[in-house]
Amino acid sequence: MKRKEAETDPLTAGGAVSFEQMMSRLEELVSRLERGDLSLEESIQAFEEGIKLVKQCTSVLGEAEKRIQHLTQEGTSLAGAAPEPQEKEEERGDDELPF
């Protein structure tokens, strides 16, 4: 019976899943393992699935971190680029006021 549930589970069926769904499934697996009411084989299967989910979540977080770093660098380079002054002091005539 447990095998049929795993086959219809979208997380193990190879479909696209969100990070939040993976984390939710991981929490569920941890909870089941902590209860201690699984057979040895069920525990091993839950552990294997959990390890796969951890790897997938780590990958997703790594990609998110790269995106954030890229966006931060873009924002910093845009903010660091000071606009050119419209008129430099050297170009101003002696009879012109600085304001």
Image: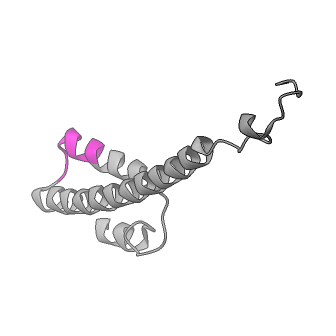
Range of residues picked out in magenta: 30-38
Q: Quadrant of the C terminus?
A: top right
Residue appearing at x 42%, y 56% in the figure: 66
Q: Residue furthest front?
A: 94
**In the depicted view, which residue is nearer to us: 17 or 28?**
17
Residue 85, compared with residue 95, is above or below; it is: below
> What secondary structure characterizes most of the magenta part?
helix
Please state which of residues 20 and 70 is positioned toward the viewer in this rendering.
70
Instruction: Describe residue 16's horizontal placement relative to residue 3 as left or right.
Output: right
Q: Residue furthest left?
A: 40
Question: Between 90 and 49, which is closer to the camera in this rendering?
Answer: 90
Height in image: 91 above or below 25? above
Report whether 69 appears left or right of 99.
left
Which residue shows up at 42% across the image and 48% down it?
24
Res 34 quadrant in image: top left
Q: Quadrant of residue 80?
A: top right
Q: Position of residue 21 (x, y in %)?
A: 46, 55
Left or right: 38 as drawn, with respect to 91: left
Say if the magenta span includes residue 26.
no
Count of numbered labels shown in the rendering: 0
Image quadrant assignment for residue 52: bottom left
> Which quadrant does the N terminus fall into?
bottom left
Residue 77 percent location from the top left of the image:
55, 48
Rendered position, 33 above or below 48: above
Residue at left offset 41%, top offset 66%: 11
Which residue lies at the image location 20% right of the left edge and 62% below the top edge?
Answer: 48
Above/below status of 89 relative to 69? above
Instruction: Name the one closer to the observer, 55 or 97.
Output: 97
